[in-house]
């Protein structure tokens, strides 16, 4: 098999990846096939097989792959047993403020990393937003924006786990730097989506008749598996994959799903698609390295004297926007940038947020597409609120990069 220039092979692989996503092929399958194509075109079958075996022997890669699988099981069990409804309903009854509820419900649903998951919170947001007289575009924006405020600081986020592992950076040092950004995103969402809305008071009487103690018990009961995982990872530094599987086992114990329900979950391709995405990210990284592409591109960037911050912002942001995948943007960016800079919590946080915000505004972003369809809003209408929010969030991210010590 005749090999071709790694740059050309990379462009072909990237174009193939984008086409597959456009054709609604899953992110995991698309990323893995693109990595395979890059390897075959640039290095040949033998070296591609070597990159594949290296991925399967890599402890970090296996940790992220199994953690992604467990997290997807967790989210599907929550959904199929309706325990997620117990969680969100208990929150809505515990809190009297409709604006707070509108921020919390999408964020809580966002704890489940399901593609297009904003569609799950849309009906609840729609019902609560009616009490504030929000129009359909504001409803779309609120549901989309607040769903995505939690991920940059959520230790069980597969994207955060992937980023920390690829860059060999402490996940909690990244989270620490992103707390101010998340607070800022919440404030931005409130000012743009909820500030001028005036809640009605018809909910007060209903709330007085409901036992708050009962609702608090339901909340703690339904949230306990996720809390258990976070405690294992943060307080006891248990391997994130092991922690996630322990959380799944705990969730099964308290939710008591039927055998048919578990069988249905294990038959869902979406569970394996996200797992495959984690594998594909590491496989892509290894094929990029084995092809010499990272050295070629990093050499070109180095000769161009590009500022480090600009590279950390624009490379992952543009890639994530174009391919509609933050994990894809990060998986491609890390091996390229690692040749010209050493990743720290400071640089990794900027990389993560740039890819994340680029993806958040991508028209191929499933949450954006599904929410817009549900509320019958056009992308141009949504972008009036979304683009300023993304710009402000990126500015805040850059300020954190500049002024919070490494």
Image: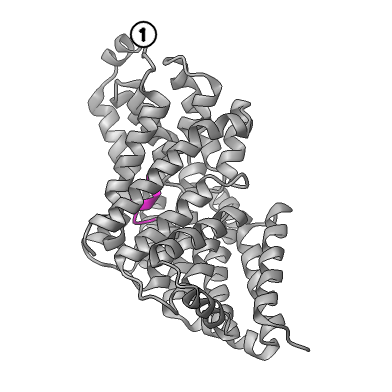
- Give yes or no for residue 185 being in the magenta stretch: no
Q: Is residue 236 left or right of residue 295?
A: left
Residue at the spot x=62%, y=47% of the render?
364
Q: Quadrant of residue 212?
A: top left
Is residue 132 something that shows in the picture?
yes
Please say if 295 is above or below 346: below
Q: Quadrant of residue 2?
A: bottom right
- Number of numbered labels in the structure image: 1
The single residue placed furthest to the front in the displayed view is: 304
| Whole-percent x, y for residue 116 in the image | 57, 44
The residue closer to the viewer here, 81 or 27, is 27
The single residue placed furthest to the right in the displayed view is: 1
- State the residue position of label 1: 202
Q: Which residues are magenta?
A: 150-156
Position of the C terminus by quadrant: bottom left
Is residue 76 something that shows in the picture?
no
Residue at the spot x=73%, y=83% of the render?
4
| Whole-percent x, y for residue 98 in the image | 36, 21
Residue at the spot x=39%, y=67% of the render?
308
The residue closer to the viewer here, 297 or 152, is 297
- Give yes or no for residue 152 being in the magenta stretch: yes
Position of the N terminus by quadrant: bottom right
| Whole-percent x, y for residue 197 in the image | 39, 17
| Whole-percent x, y for residue 64 in the image | 44, 68
């Amino acid at each position: 098999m005749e090999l071709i220039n790694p740059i050309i092979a990379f462009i072909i692989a990237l174009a193939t990846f984008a086409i597959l996503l456009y054709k609604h092929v899953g992110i995991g399958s698309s990323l893995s096939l693109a990595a395979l194509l890059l390897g075959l075109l640039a290095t040949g079958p033998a070296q591609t097989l070597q990159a594949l075996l290296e991925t399967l022997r890599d402890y970090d890669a296996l940790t992220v792959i199994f953690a992604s699988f467990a997290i997807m099981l967790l989210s599907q069990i929550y959904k199929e047993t309706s325990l997620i409804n117990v969680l969100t309903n208990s929150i809505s009854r515990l809190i009297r403020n409709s604006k707070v509820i509108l921020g919390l419900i999408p964020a809580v649903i966002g704890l489940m990393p399901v593609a297009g998951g904003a569609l799950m919170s849309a009906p609840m947001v729609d019902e609560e937003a009616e009490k504030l007289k929000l129009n359909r575009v504001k409803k779309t924006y609120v549901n989309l924006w607040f769903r995505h405020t939690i991920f940059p600081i959520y230790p069980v986020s597969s994207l955060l786990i992937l980023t920390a592992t690829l860059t060999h950076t402490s996940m909690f040092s990244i989270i620490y730097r992103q707390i101010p950004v998340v607070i800022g995103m919440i404030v931005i969402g409130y000012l743009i989506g909820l500030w001028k809305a005036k809640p009605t008071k018809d909910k007060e009487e209903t709330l007085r008749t409901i036992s708050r103690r009962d609702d608090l018990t339901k909340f703690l009961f339904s949230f306990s598996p996720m809390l258990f995982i976070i405690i294992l990872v943060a307080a006891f530094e248990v391997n994130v994959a092991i922690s996630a599987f322990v959380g799944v086992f705990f969730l099964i114990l308290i939710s008591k799903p039927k055998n048919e329900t578990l069988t249905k979950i294990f038959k869902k391709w979406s569970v394996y698609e996200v797992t495959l995405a984690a594998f594909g990210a590491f496989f892509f990284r290894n094929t990029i390295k084995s092809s010499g592409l990272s050295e070629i591109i990093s050499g070109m960037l180095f000769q161009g004297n590009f500022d480090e911050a600009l590279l950390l912002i624009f490379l992952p942001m543009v890639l994530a926007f174009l391919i509609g995948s933050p994990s894809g943007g990060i998986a491609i960016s890390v091996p390229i940038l690692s040749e010209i800079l050493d990743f720290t919590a400071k640089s990794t946080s900027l990389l993560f947020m740039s890819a994340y915000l680029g993806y958040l505004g991508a028209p191929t972003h499933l949450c954006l597409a599904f929410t817009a369809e549900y509320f019958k809003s056009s992308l141009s209408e949504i972008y009036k609120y979304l683009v300023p929010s993304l710009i402000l969030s990126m500015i805040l991210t850059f300020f954190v990069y500049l002024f919070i010590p490494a």
